[in-house]
Image (cartoon, rainbow, N blue to C red):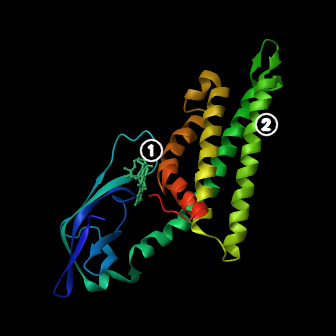
Amino acid sequence: MRTRARRRGADWIIDGSKLWITNGAIADVAVVWALADEGVGAFLVEKGTRGFTARVIENKLSLRASSTAELVLDAVTIPDSARLPEARGLKAALRCLDDARFGIAWGALGAARACIDTVLKYTESRELFGRSLNKTQLIQARLANAVRALANGQLLAWRLAKLKDEGRVESAQVSLAKWSNVRMALDIARDCRDMLGAAGITLDLSPMRHMLNLETVVTYEGTESIHELIVGRAITGQGAF
Ligand SMILES: Cc1cc2nc3c(=O)[nH]c(=O)nc-3n(C[C@H](O)[C@H](O)[C@H](O)COP(=O)(O)OP(=O)(O)OC[C@H]3O[C@@H](n4cnc5c(N)ncnc54)[C@H](O)[C@@H]3O)c2cc1C
């Protein structure tokens, strides 16, 4: 962590930057994690604070409806009361990831289902050589495989939720579900895009939009490689980061 927080009297001075921050240019307050002498801490920085700037990242091909920003903190001065008292150490920063990743494991199911629904409607109405596209064996096999993968993902998310309800869920299980369900949804979106033929590349049908958005989802909240390493550590007992 390169963003630093230094004490000066009763205040904190924060220097550094944060890249790829969702809603960073819209929010009135940013929660900034920074390394202080006593370890990692979290600080509330209000929009308009001197030395604090947010630059919108343009030209994204993915999650275009979501605003993403780079935050720069240049000798930002905030009072000690702006420090979150319980958020001490990297563990505190990482704790919120499990909840976000849990939500993503469910959200990916919705994207996959929307893609399958779109293809079902399209292939029913698309006639080729005197029959609906959905009467062909290969389209049915591809749709059946998509539904099989979706059903596995639904069961995985449901089981994760049960474990969470019982207070027994582990981070590695959340990693496995996030990684597996987003990969499943991305594969389904790509195949569904293809089953729509040329119409699949327009904004009129949703699979390619889901596909592009899922490229971000596969990266944020931990890339696939990072989740592989987390799951690998859980099953071997060896950290290989
Ligand atoms: C649209 C969008 C919104 C975002 N919103 C937020 C936000 O609100 N808040 C926030 O904090 N972040 C946010 N992020 C950032 C996101 O979490 C990071 O982009 C993501 O964690 C990957 O980090 P990175 O981009 O630095 O890639 P890098 O860490 O540079 O990784 C590059 C590649 O190297 C691989 N890699 C990295 N380390 C290892 C290793 N040890 N072994 C093997 N391979 C490795 C990765 O898997 C990846 O393939 C957002 C990103 C996007 C795209």
Location of residue 49 (image quadrant) = bottom left
Q: Nearer the viewer, mark 2 or mark 1?
A: 2
Q: Position of residue 163 (x, y in %)?
A: 70, 70
Residue, x 56% and y 67% (percent of image)? 99
Residue matched to label 2: 144
Q: Is residue 185 above or below residue 226?
A: above
Q: Residue placed farthest to the top in the image? A: 129
| Left or right for 206, reference 90 | right
Sequence order check: which comes first, mark 2 or mark 1? 1
Amino acid bearing label 2:
Ala
- Viewer-nearest residue: 230 or 114: 230
Residue, x 57% and y 67% (percent of image)? 171
Q: Position of residue 162 (x, y in %)?
A: 73, 69
Q: Quadrant of the N terminus?
A: bottom left
Q: Position of residue 240 (x, y in %)?
A: 47, 58
Q: Secondary structure at mark 1?
A: loop
Amino acid bearing label 1:
Arg
